[in-house]
Image (cartoon, rainbow, N blue to C red):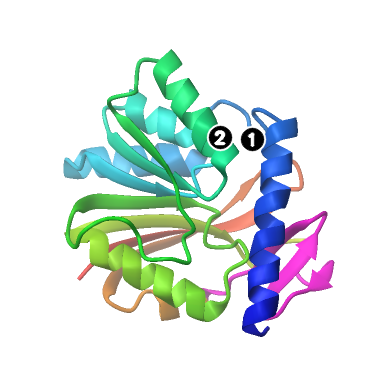
Amino acid sequence: MNIAVEKATLNAQCSHWEKTYREHRDMFGEEASAPAQYAAAFLQAKGEKNILELGAGQGRDALFFANQGFHVHALDYSNISVAEIQKKAIAQGHSQNISAICHDARQALPFPNNLLDACYAHMLFCMAFTTPELHFLSDEIRRVLKPKGICIYTVRHKGDSHYKKGMHKGDEMYEMGGFIVHFFSKEKIHELAAGYKLLDITEFEEGPLPRKLFRVTLEKM
């Protein structure tokens, strides 16, 4: 994909997500995802409190983390989702524990080096990112994490029933129903783990299809 196509694809995806969030206020439900519950327990055991969530969507996991006593920097590139998170945080008394910011994860993260205890991203990595963009994002996360900081992310993998379905968009990306998904192999996870200690890769399923995913746990070296 050339640069012009990548930019057009990103812009179209943002508009599609904005429309989806506008029409479906809680499209993923209000309960915390299973990966968020895992992440909270893992980070609490380590005594970590300062979390970056990338691709926070409508805030179900960010609000869960706040309820568990974490301070959450929730980033999403949808203005609608960020406004919704801010509204929910105020309504639930978490305005001091959740900072919601509109940000494109293809750009440098808006934090200084070695600031954050952990980064969490549920299916953000398997959105419309090219492989070089994923390497940049992985490097940026490592930059803003403290030494031995934790990164936990999930991605749909090549065993998923939607792999190679829909319109091919380059790399291992396919568009279905207006959404572009980048499907991962374990080899790609190992590639993106440069500069980290790879603590765990766990396969799990989610949703009615079901979606088939990897949950990845990394520690900054």
Tell me the quarter of the picture where residue 8 sits. bottom right
| Residues tagged 1 and 2 counted as in contact (Cβ below 8 A) | yes
Tell me the quarter of the picture where residue 4 sits. bottom right
Confirm whether residue 68 shows in the render.
yes
Q: What residue is disc 2 on?
A: 58
Q: Quadrant of the N terminus?
A: bottom right
- Residue displayed at 45% across by 28% down: 86
Reply yes or no: does residue 180 show up in magenta: yes
Rate crowding at label 2 as few (under 14), some (14 to 19) or many (20 or more) other CA atoms within 10 Å. many
Residue 64 is left or right of residue 183, and the answer is left
Q: Amino acid at mark 2?
A: Gln
Position of residue 180 relative to residue 190, above or below, is above
Q: What residue is disc 1 on?
A: 28
- Residue displayed at 71% across by 62% down: 180
Reply yes or no: does residue 67 show up in magenta: no
Which residues make up the magenta segment? 162-187
- Please state the total of marks drawn on the protein image: 2
Q: Given this view, does label 1 or label 2 mark the residue nearer the observer?
A: 2
